[in-house]
Image (cartoon, helix red, strand yellow):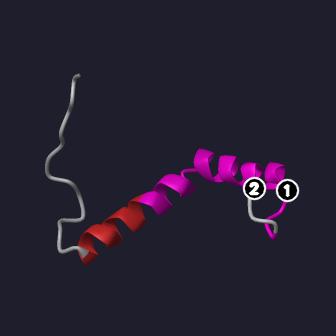
Amino acid sequence: MLPKDFPPKSTVYGYYRMWQRDGSWESLHDALRQKVRHQEGRASEATAGIVDSQ
C-alpha cells in the first residue's frame, strides 16, 4: 500500500531494515519526539510513565 511514486516494496523494506539495524530509525524517532515535546513546552524526556495491567 505504498504511494505509486515510491520504489518497489522490497526496496523500501530493505532501507527500513538497514536503518533499523544501524540505529538510524531509533535516532530519528528520538529526535522527532524531543522536538515535538519541546514545541509543546514539555521536557524533552518523559518524567513519568503509566502502566495499565488490565
Left or right: residue 3 versus residue 21 is right
**Residue 47's disc number:** none
Q: What residue type is labelled 1?
A: Pro
Residue at x-position 75% and y-position 64%: 3
Check the image and name the residue furthest to the right.
8
Nearer-the-camera pick, 5 or 38: 5
Q: In what element is the residue under mark 1?
A: loop
* C-alpha separation, residue under disc 2 versus residue under disc 1: 7 Å
Q: What residue type is labelled 2?
A: Val
Residue at x-position 61% and y-position 45%: 21
Q: In this view, does 47 lie above or below 3?
A: above
Q: Which residue bears the numbered disc 2?
A: 12
Q: Do the residues labelled 2 and 1 touch (CB within 8 Å)?
A: yes
Nearer-the-camera pick, 9 or 11: 9
Q: Does the magenta stretch include residue 6?
A: yes
Q: Is residue 35 above or below residue 46?
A: below
Q: Which residue bears the numbered disc 1?
A: 8
Across the whole image, how many numbered discs are drawn on residues?
2
Task: Classify 10 Å Cα crowding around label 2: few (below 14), some (14-19), many (20 and above).
Answer: few
Range of the magenta residues? 5-29
Q: In what element is the residue under mark 2?
A: helix
- Residue 10 lies, in percent from the top left, at 82, 49
